[in-house]
Structures are given as C-alpha cells and as structure tokens.
Amino acid sequence: MSAKRKLLTPPMPSASKHALPPFKALRVAKRNVIAVWTRQAYFAPFMAEKYLFRWMYVANNPDAVRHVLVSNAANYEKSIAVKRALQPLVGNGMFVSNGETWHKQRRIAIPAFHHKRIQSFGDFMSKGIETLMEEWAKKPDGSTIAIDEEMANITAGVVCQAMFSETLGERGRIVYDGFSEYQANLTQIDYAEMLGLPSIFSAWPSFSSRRAAKRIRQVIEEIIGDRWQDKEDRGDFLSSLLLTKDSETGKGLSETEIRDEMAVIFLAGHETTAITICWALYLISQASDVEERLLAEVKEVLNGRTATFADINNLKYTRAVVDEVLRLYPPVPVFSRTAVEDDIVDGHEIQAGSNMMVSPWLLHRHRALWKNPNRFDPDRFFLKEKRSHSKYAYIPFGVGPRTCLGASFALTEAVIMLASIVQKFSLTLPKDKDVQPVAKLSLRPHPDLPMILHKRN
C-alpha cells in the first residue's frame, strides 16, 4: 500500500485481554518482554494495542508471519529500539542495518557461513567441549556448577577461534567480559518508540554498556589491523570478510564495516548456542524418558568418544531434542519491526510508523498451532509423520531474507556439545531451585542456572 494513503479506521479493537494494560506492560517489558502477554495471547491469531500515540501489532499466525517476514519484508525494518540498543557494539552491522546497506552486507557475509567452513569449525567445537569434560571429570561427584557461565565461556572460546583462528588469550577474556557487561544492561524496550514520542525522549545505552562496547571494538580493530594487509585465507570468519567482494559492486568491506560484522558474529555466535544448551540440560533434567533415549543414541553413535561434525547426521534424536528446546525456549523470543508504509496484514490495516512484532515465544507455544504446546516432546521433530507444523509457526532463527546466517553453526555446535555432555554426565537441578525464562534481548534462565554434576559409569 502507498504510504500516502490515509487510514480512516483503527486497525482493530484494542486487544488488552491479550496483554497487560499498556502502561503496566511497559514497566513489565523493561524487565521481561515475554511477561506482558496473558493466557489469551496464546490463542490469538493477531493482536493490536495502542500505546499513547503509536499502535503495536503482533503477527501471531503463520500467514501473517509469512507476510511480515517474507512476502513484504522490505516494508518492515529493524526497529529503532533494537538499533539504539546494539549500535554502540555493532555499529551499522547486519544485525541492525536496513535497505541496500543490509543487502550488501548479507551478500558479502554469506560465503563466511558456507558448509565447508562450518565443517572445519566442528574441530573447534569438539576440542572445546572435550576440554570442558576433562575439567568436569576432575570435580567431585555431586559438585554444583553454574551451567550458564560454563556454556557462555565454552561457546565464546569456540566462536573466537572460528572468527580469528586463535583463542586470543587475554584479549579473548576482554571480549567475553565486555559482552557479559554489555548484555547485563541491555534492553530492546524504548518507551519513546513504544509511545510514539520524539526520539529526543529515548533512553540511550548506559555509560557502562558503551564503555564495554568500546573495549570489545578496540580488540577487534587491533586484530583486523594486524591482518588487513595479510589476505591469506585462514579458513575463519575474518578471512572470509577480508577476501570476499560484493558480487554486484566488486568492492569489499571497509575495516569499520568488518569490525561491525565481527561484533555481530560474536554476539550471535556464542549467545545463541550457550543458552540453547542451558535450556536443553534444564529440560532433560526434568524428563527422564528423554534423557534415557538421548543417552542410548549417543552411546551407540559415539561409543565413549567426543562428538564431531561427522556424527551430526547420525545423532538424529539429539538434533530433535535441540529443535524442541529451540521451540520452547527460542534464543530471541521477539522480533521487533517498524512498518515503513501502510499495509494490510491478516485483514487488518497497519499504519505506517507502527510497531510490528513477531514472537517465536508466542508462535511456538500457540494453542492453535501445536498439540500440547508446553510439553517437552522431541518426537515432534524426530518422527516424520509428526512434522505437520507450518514453517512459519517454527522460526527460532527467523524466516525470510533476514533468517540468521549462523543457524547452521549454532545447530552444529549445540548437537556436538549436548551429545558429548550427556554421554559423560547427568545434570540435575538443585532441590527447590526455581528457574524462570526472562527476556530482554535473548531468553535466559533467571536468575541463573546452577546444576549438580553426576558422573556416568
């Protein structure tokens, strides 16, 4: 629809029954985005709420999701709040950019995620988890470990090697600590944007967040500077970005652009896998039948050794477990967009400038789309006859032009690490420990995830 068209009617009646009252929802969303929705939201095909001067819509059925993220994706740009939250760290990198800038970045980044590169990164994943298993084996049986910290550390190390072909040593620690500090203060809720107020009223990232981002960027800049003249292909992400030219313009990325993309890769590359494995170990600890089947498979396939890339196709049930974990706890539970022009979605008129949300959290637990949606059931993905869900009802890595390029990397790492852990150890939740999913930008276990380590015979 043309941006000049004047909408004469409101998009749809207020859907307060699907969410907390607007101003209460704003306060709650600052702490936990997914806590704003009521039970009715998990039945609704489409939702709308007006927050002072601006409408917010939620596309909550496969057809609406396909329209927003695929068919008319160009009309729905990354929201200002997401860009403002992440720009101190990723600049104008692919995660926040729009238009032709994004298209160019995407074209140049695609070769970095080629199947052959992911296969070579499998060695880093296997060695990383093998080292961690050796460290755990030295601990007394029944030790309590912080799984969230352990997984964040190991995946950060793997992605650093995949990015730079080296562990980085102290510089790697600076990057990891900087990301931890940055994310601790991160939120994608911007009251001014939600309410339709001028951007002058928007909150900017805190001083500590900007300080952490600066430290990270300095390390990445140093590494890029060291290798700017050395165009040898070392098989890592940095080599690919240094060597690849845009197929349309014949030009490569500048040092600043490469720095931004490397920050994007680190942010997505360790966070997604780390929290996926955390939630997997948590869910398995609550489902003995799943753990037994998973253990039987990894014993048969691995026979005591650490999983490798070559084992992926044989770890079918392990992959189904990962897929089901991603359904119940999608790493990014909400995709936030801004409508560029007026549009019609699912029969509802959408005003230009409005906020449009697609929530994997809601879609993956939608009562009309899934049978027993809150049940942890890997057979949904293990048995072919049960794969009846729409591709637009299951979108842990997004869908359409902005589908996460790192999906294959994350899935490979999650399968290798989960299979290797389950073969050697059983983990249980401490008695009376309450774990809640809390979402700011990513969906993390709150307040933390301590688990008790038990060695298998």
Image (spheres, rainbow, N blue to C red):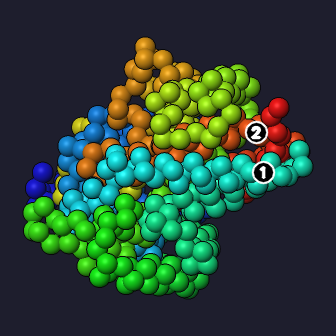
* Left or right: where 104 falls relative to 273: left
* Disc 2 target residue: 425
Q: Secondary structure at mark 2?
A: strand
Tell me where residue 305 sits by quadrant.
top right
x and y percentages locating residue 81 in the rendered image: 41, 68
Q: Secondary structure at mark 1?
A: helix
Q: Which mark is on residue 381? A: none
* Left or right: where 76 falls relative to 419: left
* Disc 1 target residue: 136
Residue 31 versus residue 449 in the image, above or below: below
* Left or right: where 252 falls relative to 63: left
x and y percentages locating residue 145 in the rendered image: 79, 53
Residue 136 versus residue 191 in the image, above or below: above
Residue type at the position of mark 1: Trp
**Residue at 53 percent of width and 83 percent of height:** 215
* Left or right: where 16 falls relative to 12: right
User: Counting other residues with Cα less than 10 Å from the Cα at mark 1, is it few (<14), some (14-19), or many (20 or more)?
Assistant: some
Task: Tell me the CA gap for discs 1 and 2.
Answer: 9 Å
**Residue at 59 percent of width and 52 percent of height:** 127
User: Counting other residues with Cα less than 10 Å from the Cα at mark 2, is it few (<14), some (14-19), or many (20 or more)?
Assistant: some
Residue 198 versus residue 95 in the image, above or below: below
Residue type at the position of mark 2: Phe
x and y percentages locating residue 295 in the rendered image: 68, 27
Identify which residue, 188 or 380, lies in the foreground: 380
Regarding residue 58, the answer to whether it shows in the image is: no
Q: Quadrant of the C terminus?
A: top right
Tell me where residue 244 sits by quadrant.
bottom left
